[in-house]
Image: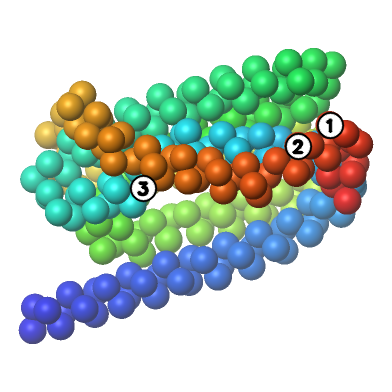
Amino acid sequence: MREQSQLVKIIQNVGWLFFDKVFRIGIGLFVGVWIARYFGPAEYGVFSCALAVIGILSPLATLGLSDIAVREIVSKPGAANQTLVSVFALQAAGSLFVAGAAYLGVSVIRPNDEMMSHVVLILAVTSIFQSTIVAKYWFEASVQSKYVVWIEDSILLLTACIKLALINLKVSLDTFVLVFLAESVLMFLALYTFFFLRCKDSSLFKFSGARCKALLTESWPLVLSSLAIMLYMRMDQIMLGEMIGPEAVGI
């Protein structure tokens, strides 16, 4: 009976994750079309270039630790809190490095493009909050992904409505991308609030330098793999923007 009950939980968990993917694709496609049509090729090209810069560096923020963290929490439940703290510290350091590197890189490559610098800075800060939501690893390891789906999809739907409202208000691009930052901050606060309500051992968090080293030893091949993939997928956008201009990227 216990194995059957666990199987049912796993199937339900997979179902929630599948729903989450479909929902995100649907909302992303619908809102993305509106964003592209509103800003046009030039400003949408700036937005796309900024996303490409952050995207290429993003493996250095997550450090390939998502799957490893879930595995470690499942296999070593007694050290789950130590794992979460170590992953949080590593991803916080990585995301801060990415934010600084992205902003510095754009400032050097395009020193006179204030719009690009502002958008990259906002998206870089957004990536800090996105990369440090390690609480969701605990929900995944505990086969409770439905709570993550409820929270993230509710906030996604709310911010999608706000984005459409801002399009109707005809706001500028650098103001518009603040919604992405607000979305990440809301998810960060909501998931950690719910995590501390659900996790009964939240008072036992301890940082471990040895644990960080062990995690990095396992994750560095995943970082290299992810960097290669992101370079392959995004570098053409940056090259096109530099050779022809953001409008070509937007098209």
Return the x and y of residue 21 as percentages of the image width and height. Answer: 52, 66
Residue 83 position by quadrant: top left
Assign a secondary structure to mark 2: helix
**Can the viewer see residue 177?**
no
Q: Identify the residue position indicated by label 2 in the image.
A: 238
Query: Residue, x 83% and y 36% (percent of image)?
Result: 241
Looking at the image, residue 157 lies above or below residue 55: below
Q: Secondary structure at mark 3?
A: helix
Above or below for 156 versus 103: below
Q: Which residue is mark 3?
A: 66
Q: Secondary structure at mark 1?
A: helix
Q: Where residue 33 appears, x then y in whole percent?
A: 79, 59
Residue drawn at the location 16% of the way across and 79% of the way down: 5
- Which residue position holds label 1? 242
Count up the numbered dots: 3
Mark 3 → mark 2, Cα distance in angstroms:
27 Å
- Residue 40 lies, with reference to residue 95, above or below; the image says below
Q: Is residue 46 left or right of residue 102?
A: right
Q: Quadrant of residue 85?
A: top left
At horizontal 75% and vertical 44% (from top left) the residue drawn is 236
Decide: few, some or many residues near mark 1? Use Cα within 10 Å; few <14, some 14-19, many ≥20: some
User: Whole-percent x and y of residue 162?
Assistant: 68, 49
Q: Nearer the viewer, residue 40 or 182?
A: 40
* Amino acid type for the residue under numbered disc 2: Ile
Q: Viewer-proximal residue, 146 or 240?
A: 240
Amino acid on which disc 3 is placed: Ser
State the CA–CA distance, disc 1 to disc 3: 33 Å
* Front of the two marks 3 and 2: 2
Q: Pointers 2 and 1 in contact (CB under 8 A)?
A: yes
The mark nearer the N terminus, 1 or 3, is 3
Amino acid tagged 1? Glu
Residue 70 visible in the displayed image: yes
